[in-house]
Amino acid sequence: MRTSTSAGSWLRRPRGALSRVIGLAAVGLAAGGVILGTSGPAGPATAPRVPNVDRFGTVWLCRPGLAADPCTVRLTAAVVGPHGGTGVQRVRAAKNPPIDCFYVYPTVSPQSTPNANLSIDPAETAVASAQAARFSQVCRVYAPMYRQLTLKAIGGHGLSVISEATAYLSMLAGWKDYLAHYNHGRGVVLIGHSQGAALLIKLIESQVDPSPALRSRLVSAVLLGGNVTVAVGSDVGGSFRHVPACSGPSTVHCVIAYSSFLQPPPANSLFGRPGAGVSALSGQGGTTALQVLCVNPEVVGGGPLLPYFPTARFPGVIGQSTGTGLSRRTPWVTFPGLYSATCMDAGGASWLQIDVVAMPGDTRPTVTQSLGPAWGLHLVDVNIALGNLVDAVRSESAAYVRATPGRR
């Protein structure tokens, strides 16, 4: 089945070369006293002196039971109609959801080094609230801090095979801690955007896809703006051998992926084209035998496009390019009926086409490609369809529980 209903280019390397680099980086990290994302000698006694560190050495941005958890913020939303009429939607985090979500945040760190440290800065807190918090309605959300490539590194200052491998190994350490000490055999949804999606592609390829046991626990993977690939004319065979594209609201053990644009991606687009953008982080090359996967969130979410945006401005430089333009008393705002989504495949690119369907007199603000045509709507890949994505995970969770009732 063909699934096309769906700051500079990063370094491109063959998958085998990246794997060798990761192996060398692991040796280097161990020799330097940094073991898979923990600082100092291995062991809980020398864990980083930052909040939210567990006794196994992982610093958790989000985890059930944390005193200050940005993934369990208030979810009340203003519902704004075409002519400014506003209702209020009140929903809450689930008290005992049957599945977990493991979230890896995108590039947000403003730190000056190529790899961020494990301190929780306002940018990580804000992006976790904006992208992951609404999933707390349907799953327990876990999000480890990791030594991500910073905004400076992505801008070309300090980006190297070692810094890329450091980011992946640090995230992998959080995943292994989660599996060993928190999962307890539960189903899990992997959620990532941009750098987070690219690292999760590598994790699925190396850890989940080859393991029938872990594939059986994978409810789904929501990997946005990461250039997941499939063989042309198929729903698998690119990034993954055994994890196919999700095809409907109740399919499980599958992946939801897309990159959103208002206009067709140009030839120099960072997303929607095999081998472009963050593809190097997941070790993916680009060939004519592959296409970037697009799964329409309207199809898997079972309804028209439903965006949710936080009303608070994002901190730092990214905040200059985001926001709703509205001041609201609620932490969220949604604009039902303002957008539609269609997966497109043309000119060697596959993308999620976002169209504004505002009627005359519609006073609601609309999204823009603020970073330019090559980036498309990358900054709002998650939020432009967040309601649909949460609904997709809700229905996938129900299907997973029906199929595996003993796993709850």
Image (cartoon, rainbow, N blue to C red):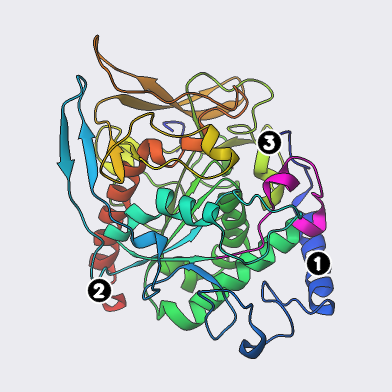
Image location (x, y in percent) of residue 277? 67, 38
Q: CA distance from mark 2 to mark 3?
A: 41 Å
Instruction: State the residue in front, 129 or 292.
Output: 129
Q: In the picture, residue 81 is in which quadrant?
A: top left
Evaluate whether residue 30 shows in this view: yes
Query: Which residue, given by chain and number where applicable, does mark 3 sit on?
Result: 276
Which sits earlier in the primary sequence, circle 1 or circle 2? 1
Which sits earlier in the primary sequence, circle 1 or circle 3? 1
Task: Characterize the local packing of mark 2: few (<14), some (14-19) or many (20 or more) Cα atoms within 10 angstroms.
Answer: few
Horizontal placement of 206 versus 31: left or right?
A: left
Query: Which residue, given by chain and number where applicable, does mark 2 sit on?
Result: 405
Query: Which residue, given by chain and number where applicable, does mark 1 sit on?
Result: 25
Say which element carries label 2. helix
Disc nearest the viewer among 1 and 3: 1
Q: Is residue 178 above or below residue 384?
A: below
Which sits earlier in the primary sequence, circle 2 or circle 3? 3
Q: Is residue 350 above or below residue 89?
A: above
Task: Characterize the local packing of mark 1: few (<14), some (14-19) or many (20 or more) Cα atoms within 10 angstroms.
Answer: some
Say which element carries label 1. helix
Query: What predominant SS class does the magenta segment belong to?
Result: loop
Image location (x, y in percent) of residue 50? 58, 74
Residue at (55% x, 27% y) in the render: 376
At label 3, the amino acid type is Ala
Q: Are marks 1 and 2 in contact (CB under 8 Å)?
A: no
Q: In the picture, residue 79 is in which quadrant?
A: top left
Image location (x, y in percent) of residue 313? 44, 40
Q: In the picture, residue 17 is in which quadrant?
A: bottom right
Evaluate whether residue 105 shows in this view: no
At label 1, the amino acid type is Ala
Instruction: State the residue in front, 283 or 231.
Output: 283
